[in-house]
Amino acid sequence: MLHKTRGIVLKTTLYSESSVVVQIFTEKFGIQSYMINGVKKPKAKIRMNMLQPLHLVEMIVYHKNNTSIQRVSELRPAPIFRSIPYDIIKSTIVLFLNEVLYKSIRQQTTDEYLFDFIFSSVCWFDESEELNVNFHLAFLLKLSRFLGFAPSTQTKSDQSYFDLQEGEFRSSIPVHPYFLEKSDASLFISLFSIPFEKINEINMENQTRRSILDKILVYYTLHTASFGDIRSHQILEDVLS
């Protein structure tokens, strides 16, 4: 049976000389693997450049329950990116976010709220004319709400430490090393709370931005099973420095 759905490309793996298996987070079915044949042929209807990390697509697919690899009837970019593939900073940020998403989301069932957040956020980032070097920080912290470990924003005047393990403010230093002191905790919560349209109002030096990103990745490691190391982390830091 054929179904129409939107999708977010997560990972493309070569299967043969002209075929690939693509993992796509779909609006209707969650994460699914699709076999796509002939992507390297000169007259291919579905080409490799349509299957890059975090590309947004519309698809008509065959779907069978309890089948590990599905089939695609039609696939096209929707929307077509205006800036991400042509801007080295944006494309590097997207590559990094794709790696984190691939290691964080496990939904093999429908999750429309999570899908809509990722889809609309990537659209906004592509369409934004002003370079937003804080976008990845805000995105990951906002994403945590949909993954079930949003940080608590409630704090009292005597609570200067943010406990990354518990996701909340404390008045004393935790017994473990996973915490933020007052200045970094304030940035952490601001990035979580502020709309994307205003994230450039948060001023940070490169060193502070790297430190906050490191803490965000620690936060994900603490709250996501089998998160592991992020390989594109250093590339991102080099591009943004």
Image: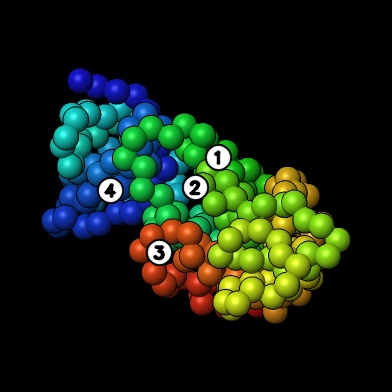
Asked if 59 appears above or below 151 in the picture, the reply is: above
Q: What is the CA distance from the residue labelled 4 to the residue labelled 1?
A: 21 Å
Q: Residue furthest top?
A: 1
Q: Residue at x 24, y 22 (%)?
A: 2
Q: Residue furthest right?
A: 157
Q: Earlier in the sequence, mark 2 or mark 1?
A: 1
Q: Which residue is mark 1?
A: 117
Residue type at tag 2: Leu
Residue type at tag 4: Val
Residue 112 versus residue 9: which sits nearer the camera? Answer: 112
Q: Is residue 110 visible?
A: yes
Q: Is residue 240 visible?
A: no
Residue 222 versus residue 18: which sits nearer the camera? Answer: 222
Task: Give the secondary structure at mark 3.
Answer: loop
Q: Is residue 191 left or right of residue 91?
A: right
Q: Earlier in the sequence, mark 3 or mark 4?
A: 4
Asked if 213 appears above or below 154 in the picture, the reply is: below
Quarter location, residue 182: bottom right
Residue type at tag 3: Phe
Q: Is residue 44 left or right of residue 225?
A: left
Image quarter where the C terminus lies is bottom right
Residue type at tag 1: Phe
Q: Earlier in the sequence, mark 3 or mark 1?
A: 1
Task: Give the secondary structure at mark 4.
Answer: strand
Quarter location, residue 155: bottom right
Q: Which residue is mark 4?
A: 22
Q: Which of the labelled discs sits on residue 147, or is there none?
A: 2
Q: Which of the labelled discs sits on residue 227, or is there none?
A: 3
Q: Are marks 4 and 1 in contact (CB under 8 Å)?
A: no
